[in-house]
Amino acid sequence: MSDYRDPEAETPLPVPSIGRPSPEVHESWRVLRPLGYRDFRVLFGAVVLSIFAAGMWAVVMVYSVIGAGGGPLDLSVVAASNATGLLLCAIPGGIVADRVSRRLIVRLVELVNLLAITSVVVVGWIGVVTIPQLAIAAFALGAGAGFFFPAYSAMLPRILPAQQLLAANGLEGAIRPALQQAAGPAVAGVIVAAVMVPTHAAVAIAIAHALALALLLFQRPEPVLDRQEPSGSAKSVFHDLKEAVVFTAKTPWLLWTLLYASGWVLVFVGPEEVLLPFITRERIGDDPRWFGFLLAVYGLGGVIGSIVVSSRPLPRRYLTVMNLVWGVSTLPFAIIGVTDQYWVMLAAVFVCGFGFSYGNVIWGTLLQRRVPTHMLGRISSLDFFVSLALMPLSMALAGPLAEVVPIPVIFLVAGFLPLLFGLVAIVAAKMPQDEIAHPLDR
């Protein structure tokens, strides 16, 4: 994979200091260096606005369903529509990202997002939004995410030097939990309370998507990384998909990490999403703020984990570190199953969030640096799909399993199995040898 450097890009952001910066200060600002490149600033600004809008939608969607007279079943239908759109479009999104302009894809996604939310706003002003309309809007937003993520991932190596990818992924990894899990829902809650009609609050979401689309209109065409880069335009969609699957199957570090991620999702996500709210209520209290603060601390751990990993050079043992951090950071989850101390639960979820984001930043960077650029969209979409495919099953199994298996045992298994999966992946893919054979510039 060639190392592209944009000749028109500005120099990376200067380090604020008096005199010559020390190596420590210089390293501490590493995470901000990608912002010295114009096209990344434009793209990142749009991503910030879009993620913020997604965080607001999570709250507005709930209260719009309630405002339409819906109950838990109706909310499940709308939420499931969003997830269905995401899963159905993840693979096609990757294929399209390798065939057409990524810049065009992200612009069209933001346009669809804007139209979907605007439809909710307009109908809310002139009448009552129905559950089917909310489900359609949610599906469109989920489908858009399925196209946006592979295009965004494939775009970064085309607009940034390879050495800036870790920091770029760290920035995205930091702002996502901060905006989608904290700031976005908080702002939406305030707006919904102020305007009283939930769909009126969707105006703020529409504005955020409109600004994101406006920013993307200023993005320049992507440079060509390599004149020898294959083009998939003359080949079938089936060929494109087969090529990505074969590459994944023949690349041990990629295959085994995806298998590890699938196992991690199956054993961890269900207890986290389904059982954690109930044990928080039973052991700590009924006030929803107890659980809300737990989620906020989990997100804070993700923010700090992303910043920490992207503020330093890529680890030399990048595959081993990534898998071990993922596995070790889930161990505190086992403690949640047996403790009734709130501060212990807070510490445990913080470590889980820290390790999850720390490993994810490395993972996204490895895809962009070690996967051939011409198939990066497809591989990213495969990663996206595989990581999410078992999530509904995990959540569906958690409740019934809790009826026959003690909660502490479930959390113990969810805490320890990911580490075991990670160790198996390291050994099976011979990751230590792979790291030595394929060193990456730091």
Image: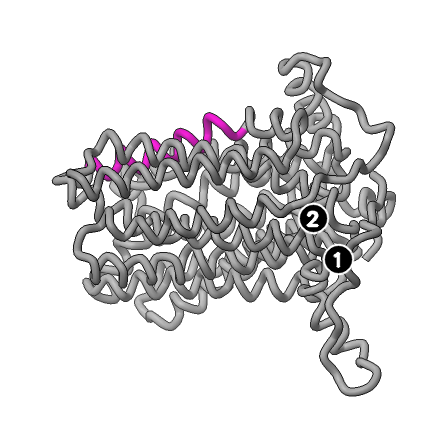
- The local secondary structure at tag 2 comes to helix
Q: Quadrant of residue 242?
A: top right
Task: Mark yes or no: residue 251 visible.
Answer: yes
The residue range painted magenta reads: 73-90
Residue that numbered label 2 is attached to: 365
Task: Mark yes or no: residue 407 visible.
Answer: no
Give the left or right position of residue 227, taking residue 114 as reference: right
- State whether the magenta stretch is mostly helix, strand or loop: helix
Whether 115 is drawn above or below 410: the answer is above
- Nearest to the observer: residue 138 or residue 214: 214
Q: Residue at x 72, y 61 (%)?
A: 36
Q: Find the distance from the CA under tag 2 to the CA under tag 1.
A: 9 Å
Whether 43 is drawn above or below 329: the answer is above
Residue that numbered label 1 is attached to: 314
Give how far across and how far down residue 257 sits, in percent.
64, 39
Q: Residue at x 44, y 54 (%)?
A: 52
Question: How would you rate the neighbour count of disc 1 (Cα within 10 Å): few for under 14, some for 14-19, many for 20 or more?
Answer: many
Give how far across and how far down residue 252 sits, in percent.
73, 34
Q: Amino acid at mark 1?
A: Leu
Which quarter shows the N terminus? Answer: top right
Which quarter shows the C terminus? Answer: bottom right
Give the left or right position of residue 382, taking residue 70 as reference: right
- The local secondary structure at tag 1 comes to loop
Q: Are marks 2 and 1 in contact (CB under 8 Å)?
A: yes
Q: Amino acid at mark 2?
A: Thr
Give how far across and how far down residue 352 sits, in percent.
49, 58
Is residue 85 on the magenta stretch? yes
